[in-house]
Image (tube, helix red, strand yellow):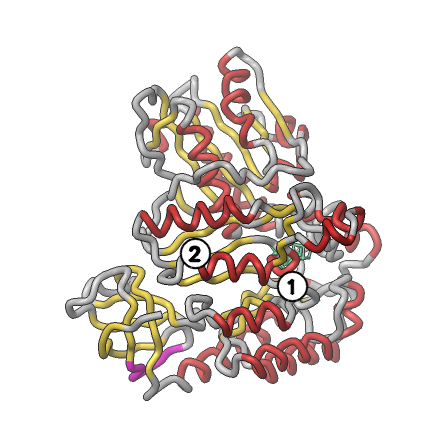
């Protein structure tokens, strides 16, 4: 969670405070919102008690994400007492999921706005100024906010997110995203490259290209991806896929590191991995969520791949890039999961040697195919115990992985001070592993070679031995 700083504009008359919750996509969206509001007379404040407008940019992926927002709203009652004119908006996935219900249930909320209606926010604020409450949860087939130059919020000035697509067409049965973010659509490549060039001009050294399923990126003039098959073969021929986009980005900013997230195991392909090999500035790192290591569970999750398919994708990646960092997402205790099936997830983690994983307990989301058709029948205590086993195994693997770099040299982009000491820098290796070392005369934004001397579960610790180049 973080609050948002909007640089003051000449005409700024009101103050805005935003908090972002959930995934990187939301943090990136808050930068778009900041830009839109900045154009309409809003300046920022870090001080929520002095804000004219408070936006919560929310997540709906698990129930506990929504409960956090409900708690936060309870707190904001005090702010409204302090300032009767205060406008409170709930934006993003929770707004889209609950729609009018949110206005009914949370009386202090004035604005409810879904992820495709951010251009309307100034108008929604004006409606509230006129004495009403305002809602816009329309999902769009085309909106990518491609023309909006995001305001970089609380940025370290070194790394930035660039959104390349919106929505998702995959319909994994557990997931609320297709309902809250709508149809998959890709952003025009030229606008992506323009944004990256602008970042480079402003001194940024690394971008992460963002989407729910980046390997499915496809530009053919705009609109929903599902329209692609209606094009003529000649029209299809001129489309830009994810590997093409990566190449365009790599060539346009050769001195900038480029990462991407998230990859779906169904769509990652050799063309993308070969493109990563071709350009030194494309980082050797792939986030490839498996969700489960059992084929029956993957099947009822509608992930459209089997355990073997997933393992083949890892083999393919490591064949082409032997030292590629790979991370994973795992869900524990999905509907009907047996003990044996849980053990398959453990054995996949054991086999795959992920750098790290994000690990979750299954949380049933109303309206999803799983909520409608499958029994959420794994008891809570079993889900928790299985999650603990998954975390313990993965932590051991992460520790071993970091240990395996002791005595080796890794290339690290310095992002800022380490959490624990102002005498140390923190950065990430090519494989996206956190690396810590004494500052000496190096500066944030420098790319340095670090000799790894020690390690923990979450980091490698060492000493810089000189500047590196891409
Ligand atoms: N599009 C990405 C993919 O398919 O890999 C994932 C996006 S989702 C925002 C991030 C992660 O949240 C998923 O990979 C999944 O592990 C987790 N997740 C999604 N729905 C969930 C649910 N109902 N309960 C628990 N975890 C969930
Ligand atoms: Fe959700 Fe699946 Fe789409 Fe990822 S790919 S956002 S898990 S539906």
* Magenta-highlighted residues: 451-456
Q: Quadrant of residue 360?
A: bottom right
Looking at the picture, tell me which residue is in the foreground, 62 or 285.
285
Q: Is residue 381 visible?
A: no
Q: Seen in the image, is 145 located left or right of residue 39? A: right
Q: What x and y, as percent, mark residue 435?
A: 34, 72
Q: Quadrant of residue 432?
A: bottom left
Q: Quadrant of ligand 1?
A: bottom right
Look at the picture and state if 291 lies above or below 181. Answer: below
Measured Cα–Cα span from mark 1 to mark 2: 26 Å
Residue designated by label 1: 264
Q: Is residue 285 visible?
A: yes
Identify the residue at horizontal 70%, vertical 50% (top origin): 365
Residue designated by label 2: 252
Q: Dot 1 surroundings within 10 Å: few (below 14), some, or many (20 or more)?
A: many
Look at the picture and state if 198 lies above or below 137. Answer: below
């Amino acid at each position: 969670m973080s609050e948002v700083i909007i640089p003051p504009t000449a005409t700024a008359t009101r103050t805005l405070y935003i908090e972002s919750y959930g995934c990187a996509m939301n943090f990136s969206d808050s930068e778009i919102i900041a830009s839109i509001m900045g154009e309409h007379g809003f300046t920022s404040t870090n001080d929520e008690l002095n804000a004219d407008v408070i936006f919560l940019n929310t997540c709906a992926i698990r129930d506990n994400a929504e409960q956090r927002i409900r708690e936060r709203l309870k707190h904001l009652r005090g702010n409204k007492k302090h300032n009767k004119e205060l406008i409170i908006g709930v934006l993003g996935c929770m707004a889209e999921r609950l729609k009018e219900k949110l206005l009914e249930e949370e009386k202090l909320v004035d604005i409810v706005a879904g992820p495709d209606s951010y251009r309307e926010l100034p108008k929604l604020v004006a409606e509230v100024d006129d004495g009403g409450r305002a809602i816009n949860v329309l999902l769009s087939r085309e909106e990518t906010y491609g023309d909006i130059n995001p305001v970089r919020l609380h940025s370290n000035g070194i790394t930035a997110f660039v959104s390349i697509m919106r929505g998702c067409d995959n319909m994994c049965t557990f997931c609320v995203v297709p309902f809250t973010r709508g149809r998959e659509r890709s952003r025009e490549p030229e606008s992506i490259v323009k944004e990256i060039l602008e970042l480079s001009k402003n001194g940024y050294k690394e971008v992460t290209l963002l989407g729910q399923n980046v390997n499915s990126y496809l530009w053919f003039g705009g609109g929903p991806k599902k329209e692609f098959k209606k094009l003529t073969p000649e029209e299809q021929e001129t489309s830009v896929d994810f590997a093409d986009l990566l190449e365009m980005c790599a060539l346009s900013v050769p001195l900038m590191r480029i990462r991407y997230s998230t990859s779906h195991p169904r769509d990652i392909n050799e063309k993308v991995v070969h493109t990563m090999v071709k350009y030194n500035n494309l980082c050797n790192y792939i986030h490839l969520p498996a969700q489960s290591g059992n084929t029956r569970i993957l099947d009822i999750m509608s992930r459209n791949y089997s355990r073997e398919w997933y393992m083949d994708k890892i083999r393919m990646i490591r064949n082409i890039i032997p030292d590629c960092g790979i991370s994973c997402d795992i869900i524990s205790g999905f509907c009907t999961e047996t003990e044996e099936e849980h053990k398959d997830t453990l054995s996949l983690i054991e086999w795959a040697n992920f750098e790290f994983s994000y690990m979750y307990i299954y949380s049933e989301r109303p309206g999803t195919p799983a909520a409608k058709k499958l029994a959420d029948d794994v008891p809570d205590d079993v889900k928790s115990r299985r999650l603990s086993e998954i975390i313990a195994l993965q932590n051991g693997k992460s520790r071993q992985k970091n240990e395996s770099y002791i005595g080796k040299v890794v290339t690290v982009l310095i992002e800022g001070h380490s959490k624990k000491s102002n005498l140390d820098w923190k950065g990430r290796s090519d494989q996206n592993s956190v690396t810590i070392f004494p500052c000496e005369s190096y500066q944030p934004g420098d790319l340095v070679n670090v000799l790894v001397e020690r390690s923990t579960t979450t980091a490698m610790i060492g000493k810089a031995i000189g500047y590196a180049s891409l």
